[in-house]
């Protein structure tokens, strides 16, 4: 694995690939420049500070989305060992998903929970 370990949440190891630093930088830069255009009265420090906070919240929302997939898989007796966040995707490392006899039903269940958490986060 190239990257670093963020920690363990709900029994799932979370790893961050170095490519996520690129996304974090691009999101922060884009938001800071947008804040500067929309609110020219804000100081540069305020623009950057709010952009960094928004980028962290973005990352946390993606992490919550992926953890939701993992928690559903774990609840259905298909343990997920780790999540690795890459540039545009996350990878769940499950121990038995490949040999699961009800993979279709499990996949539908897993696919629904990630977006559900994302929508819940946007509605609050």
Image (spheres, rainbow, N blue to C red):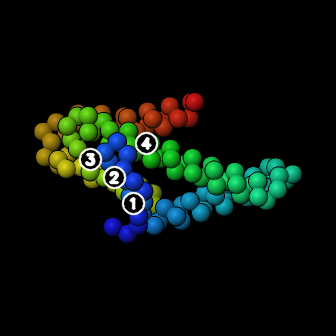
Asked whether the beta carbons under mark 3 and mark 1 sit within 8 Å of each other, the answer is no
N-terminal of the two: label 1 or label 4? 1
Q: Is residue 66 left or right of residue 20?
A: left
Q: Residue 65 — which label?
A: 4
Which residue does the numbered mark 2 point to in the structure image?
Answer: 13
Q: Is residue 62 left or right of residue 24?
A: left
- The local crowd at label 3, few if under 14, some if 14 to 19, many if 20 or more residues have their Cα within 10 Å, is many
**Between 116 and 82, which is closer to the camera in this rendering?**
82
- The local crowd at label 1, few if under 14, some if 14 to 19, many if 20 or more residues have their Cα within 10 Å, is some
N-terminal of the two: label 2 or label 4? 2
Q: Is residue 33 above or below residue 101?
A: below
- Secondary-structure class at tag 1: strand
- Secondary-structure class at tag 4: helix
- Secondary-structure class at tag 2: strand
Q: Is residue 12 left or right of residue 124?
A: left
**Between 56 and 26, which is closer to the camera in this rendering?**
56
Q: Residue furthest bottom?
A: 2
Asked whether the beta carbons under mark 1 and mark 2 sit within 8 Å of each other, the answer is yes
Q: Nearer the viewer, mark 2 or mark 4?
A: 2
> Alpha carbon of mark 1 to alpha carbon of mark 4: how far?
18 Å
N-terminal of the two: label 2 or label 3? 2
- The local crowd at label 2, few if under 14, some if 14 to 19, many if 20 or more residues have their Cα within 10 Å, is some
Which residue does the numbered mark 1 point to in the structure image?
Answer: 5
Residue pictured at 36% horizontal, 34% vertical = 112
Q: Is residue 30 above or below residue 109?
A: below
Q: Nearer the viewer, mark 1 or mark 4?
A: 1
> Alpha carbon of mark 1 to alpha carbon of mark 2: how far?
8 Å
- Secondary-structure class at tag 3: strand
């Amino acid at each position: 694995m190239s990257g670093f370990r963020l920690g363990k949440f709900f029994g799932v190891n979370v790893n961050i690939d170095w490519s996520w630093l690129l996304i974090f930088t691009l999101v922060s830069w884009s938001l800071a420049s947008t804040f500067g255009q929309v609110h020219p009265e804000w100081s540069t420090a305020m623009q950057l500070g709010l952009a960094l906070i928004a980028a962290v919240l973005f990352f946390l929302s993606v992490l919550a989305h992926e953890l939701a997939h993992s928690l559903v898989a774990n609840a259905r007796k298909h343990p997920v060992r780790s999540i690795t966040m890459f540039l545009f995707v996350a990878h769940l490392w499950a121990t038995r998903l490949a040999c699961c006899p009800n993979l279709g039903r499990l996949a539908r269940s897993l696919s629904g929970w990630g977006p559900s958490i994302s929508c819940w986060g946007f509605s609050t």
